[in-house]
Image (tube, rainbow, N blue to C red):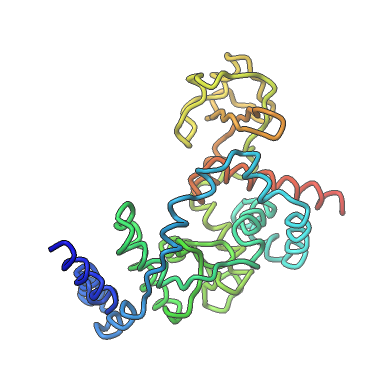
Amino acid sequence: MPLLLAVLASVTHARGYDATPEGRALIEEMVTKYGYDQGKVETLLADATRIDRILESISRPAEKTLTWHEYRKIFIKPERVERGLAFLKEHDEAFARAESEFGVPATVIAAIIGVETWYGNYTGNYRVIDALATLAFDYPPRSRFFRSELIQYLLMTREQGFDPLDVKGSYAGAMGYGQFISSSYRHFAIDFDGDSIADILTNPVDAIGSVANYFSAHHWREGEPIAEPMDGHLPQDSPLLTRELKPQLTVTDYREAGLSPKQVSGEDAAARAILLQGADGPELWLTYHNFFVITRYNHSHLYAMAVLQLADELNKHRNSDR
């Protein structure tokens, strides 16, 4: 019996996701709730292909397998800084306007795009329809999330006038310069160049404005610090090294532990200490609200630290050229 079931499942899969019970349920939802043409959704799901490499990749993200020293080497390198400076110069007007309108530093916006896609050079080679269908229907640990993202993707492509079978992105279905997932695209992507299309796939100006809008919507605080290195020491089992990404303690708590923050004046400012494994040993950092905002983009303090340090490098070289 198990063998027969396996054969039947294989036959169903060969016919496409439109033939599975989960696929039929999604088709019905798209038709009844969102007014999609049934034949169109059936065609899209029939065309979507399971990709095993996607399932392998999502099971071992770099943020969970590398130390800070290893992770940093991927993103903080002279070539990425040099390309970032050129990208800032090429789109200087858009960056200046984004910084003025949203209060997010140009170098932080550029660092996000630099970390995500090397300033638009590597935006992903998977068809988004394949990535999201694979994860929605064949990755049980997060199938609910990716099913929702697949729905959001179909809605987004309809709204923007994109062909759902043409758009390419990452193995997780993230798209464009800033690697927005479908729900983020619908909520935070904006038309920043005035052509009535929010295109972060091929339009760097829209991408710059959209990343700035994303941070603004997640309560970036203009002019406030992000993080700073500490000279003091905290043991690895210290209760001051909290697990939550959102700061739960204050600057006062860390001052009382012997640390000396310099970037924050308010003693009641929220703060979180993190201990990273650097090239020369442990690194202790005190992070603030804006660091937490960066983790809203990717829920990893390694990611946020890479963005911060790339932005710092861009700042340093940019200022020295002026």
Q: Quadrant of residue 122?
A: bottom right
| Along the viewing direction, whichever of 169 and 216 lies nearer the viewer | 169
> Where does the image place residue 3, in percent across and percent down from the top left?
18, 65
| Along the viewing direction, whichever of 126 and 38 lies nearer the viewer | 126
> Where does the image place residue 281, in percent across and percent down from the top left?
68, 28
Q: Is residue 301 above or below residue 26?
A: above
- The residue shown at (63%, 55%) is 115
> Where does the image place residue 86, in percent across and percent down from the top left?
77, 63
| Along the viewing direction, whichever of 29 and 302 lies nearer the viewer | 302
Q: Is residue 294 above or below residue 246?
A: below
Left or right: where 152 falls relative to 316? left
Q: Is residue 277 above or below residue 220?
A: above
Question: Visible in this render: residue 246?
Answer: yes
Q: How many marks?
A: 0
- The residue shown at (57%, 20%) is 254
Q: Is residue 16 above or below residue 294?
A: below
Residue located farthest toward the bottom when viewing the structure as drawn: 39
Residue located farthest toward the left when viewing the structure as drawn: 1
Q: Quadrant of the N terminus?
A: bottom left
Residue located farthest toward the right when viewing the structure as drawn: 321
Left or right: where 122 falls relative to 28? right
> Where does the image place residue 199, in percent across and percent down from the top left?
54, 73
| Along the viewing direction, whichever of 196 and 274 lies nearer the viewer | 274
- The residue shown at (51%, 51%) is 297
